[in-house]
Image: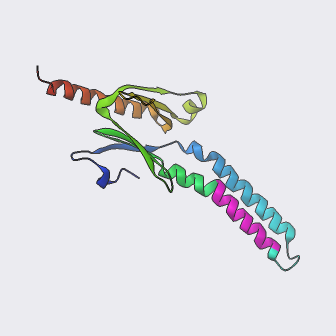
Amino acid sequence: MSLPRKLMIDGEQTVETTRTHVKKLFVPFLVLLAVCVAAGFLIASIGDKGDGKAGWVVVAIAAVLIVWGSVLPFVGWYLWTYTLTNKRLVEQKGILTRTGRVIPLSRINDVAFEKNLNDRLLGCGTLIIHDASEQAGLELDDIPRVEAFHRTVTNLVFEKHDQQRNDEPV
């Protein structure tokens, strides 16, 4: 899910779009698995006893738990994107209320990344971007292939700064 064309500036091209690593979905997957196993066990335990309403109650509770514990986290993960264009870095997130942050490449001062042990095993990390504003730096957590994304952002920032230096009158 890339940045919609209607939100792009003239001459802007998408370079890369990413979202957080799928490791963020590990707990929602475990919730889904546990709820399905528990619901299946309870329905099998109830069997044909009674008029069948108890089985439907178990299914209804399982459905609510699955939506709350698995579906909503998945949709939130899917809709949280980081888009790098040739002019800016855009973070967008939210299910019902969309929020975002835009950092022009010309205002970026520092780009760094960090990876702990499990990030190194999974091939992801945190990208930290500091810009020339009063706000704290933007931390992009659990970015897949963080070194490649870091390299791409750094190259675009250098190109943008060189372009500005060449445009300045002497």
Is residue 65 located in the magenta-colored stretch of the structure? Answer: yes
Location of residue 170 by image quarter: top left
Part of the protein shown in magenta: 54-69
Q: Residue furthest left?
A: 170
Count the numbered circles shown. 0
**Side (left or right) of 53 relative to 135:** right
**Side (left or right) of 47 relative to 146:** right
Q: Position of residue 97 (x, y in %)?
A: 48, 54
Q: Which secondary structure dominates the residues rendered in magenta? A: helix
Location of residue 134 by image quarter: top left
Q: Position of residue 151 (x, y in %)?
A: 37, 30
Q: Taking 70 as reference, is 158 above or below it?
A: above
Q: Residue furthest bottom?
A: 51
Q: Position of residue 168 (x, y in %)?
A: 15, 25
**Residue at (35% x, 32% y) in the render:** 153
Q: Residue furthest front?
A: 134
Is residue 148 located in the magenta-colored stretch of the structure? Answer: no
Q: Taking 85 as reference, is 168 above or below it?
A: above
**Residue at (46% x, 31% y) in the render:** 127
Q: How is the image coloured?
A: rainbow
Q: Position of residue 109 (x, y in %)?
A: 35, 25
**Side (left or right) of 164 relative to 99:** left
Q: Residue furthest right?
A: 49
Seen from the viewer's position, the closer of residues 114 and 89 is: 89
**Residue at (52% x, 35% y) in the render:** 123
Seen from the viewer's position, the closer of residues 63 and 25 is: 63
